[in-house]
Amino acid sequence: MRALSKATIYALRALIYVASKDNKDQQYVTIGEISEELNISFHFLTKTFQVLTQNGVLESHRGPHGGVLLKKPIDRIFLIDLVHILEGNDFFEKCLLGLPGCGEKEPCPVHNFWKNVKGSLEKEFEKTSLAHLIKGISTGKMRI
Amino acid sequence: MRALSKATIYALRALIYVASKDNKDQQYVTIGEISEELNISFHFLTKTFQVLTQNGVLESHRGPHGGVLLKKPIDRIFLIDLVHILEGNDFFEKCLLGLPGCGEKEPCPVHNFWKNVKGSLEKEFEKTSLAHLIKGISTGKMRI
DNA sequence: TTATATTAAGACAATTTTGTCCCAAAAATA
DNA sequence: TATTTTTGGGACAAAATTGTCTTAATATAA
């Protein structure tokens, strides 16, 4: 099951990387470092990071000692926000069969079934922040 | 969220269509009829139906009065089987971030979170059959 | 046996997603 | 001011998915 596009997955891994650096003096992290550490295409990551910057998740700075920085504390950046920004607002709207007319009034055959699945997934995404995701990274037992 | 590929979605809709025809004398249904009724590309549907035929979900017959037919009763064709056949066996195996090393021993940051989501989804797919999905079709309130 | 209706199978085209490359813009520093 | 380092943004290429078309194989029926 590929729930998320590769672009989103890369962004998530990259954000987890940034979040897991304990970076008290708030130094910018370069996309070059991230892409190298995580083996993600530099240019591809740059593009999706631009979107995150435009949407207030990251703060970017050009030039020497530039890079990106999380614009909010890690316990206030939630999976659901990232998904909305990167996958579009109808990520949780469309039904499993993607029929245009499907809705409460005229549900498709899988509508009610899917509504439950989607609902619980959405709740999980709403309550999961970067802070939750980086737990275990520092112990070295998990890799991004 | 596009959990399923278009090919799988088309197949599911088509199977729902076939299942919802009450067809006591077990006449073959042509792919032409299905594709026309559901506005699905005939050739594209044909290809994924071939896979379902090869995997024992459908029975096909060529020539006049030929077509396809469900090989099992509608309450014994489960979503999980269709997904395994059409999306591959690792549909429920891979983690959200798709990291190769991720597993119980060395879980990625989202592993445990995703395991729950995936688990409940899998359970739903396991217990949902075509019989469940066609409920409501006959009333005319739902469209495929 | 011939014509017709149907699925099977594969080549090919279009579209979408993913990935690469180049140059511009901005900022730091010498 | 010139040089270097970095993100921004767009053009382009590659790969994957989706969609179209043509022909073959098979079955029915006239």
Image: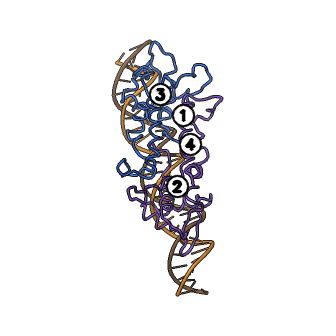
Chain colours: A purple, B blue, C orange, D brown
Q: Give, as a three-letter code, the residue at label 4.
A: Lys
SS class of the residue under badge 4? helix
- The quadrant of the image that shows the C terminus of chain A is bottom left
As displayed, is residue A124 above or below residue B42?
below
Badge nearest the viewer, 1 or 2: 2
User: Amino acid type of disc 2?
Assistant: Leu
In which quadrant of the rendered view does residue A40 lie?
bottom left
Instruction: Tell which tag, 4 or 3, sits nearer the viewer.
Output: 4
> Does residue C14 lie above or below B75 as drawn?
below
Q: Depth check: give the residue in front, B69 or A97.
A: A97
Q: Label 3's element?
A: loop
What's the distance in space between the residues labelled 4 and 3, CA to CA?
Answer: 22 Å
Query: Which subunit holds the residue at mark 4?
Result: A
Residue located beneath label 3 in the image:
B128
Q: Look at mark 1 in the image and give the residue it sits on.
A: A114
Q: In this orientation, does residue B64 appear?
A: no
Q: Name the residue under label 2.
A: A130
Q: Mark 3 lies on which chain?
A: B
Q: Which residue lies furthest to the right in this view?
A: A105
Residue at point 45% right, 21% down? B75
Which comes before the other along the chain, label 1 or label 2? 1
Rounded to the nearest angstrom, the CA distance separating label 1 from label 4 is 14 Å
Specify whether residue B136 is in view: yes
Is circle 1 on the same chain as circle 2? Answer: yes
Left or right of A67? Residue A142 is left
In the picture, the disc for residue A122 is none
User: Residue A115 in the image: x percent, y percent?
Assistant: 57, 34
Residue B54: x and y in percent read 36, 30
| Marks 4, 3 in one chain | no
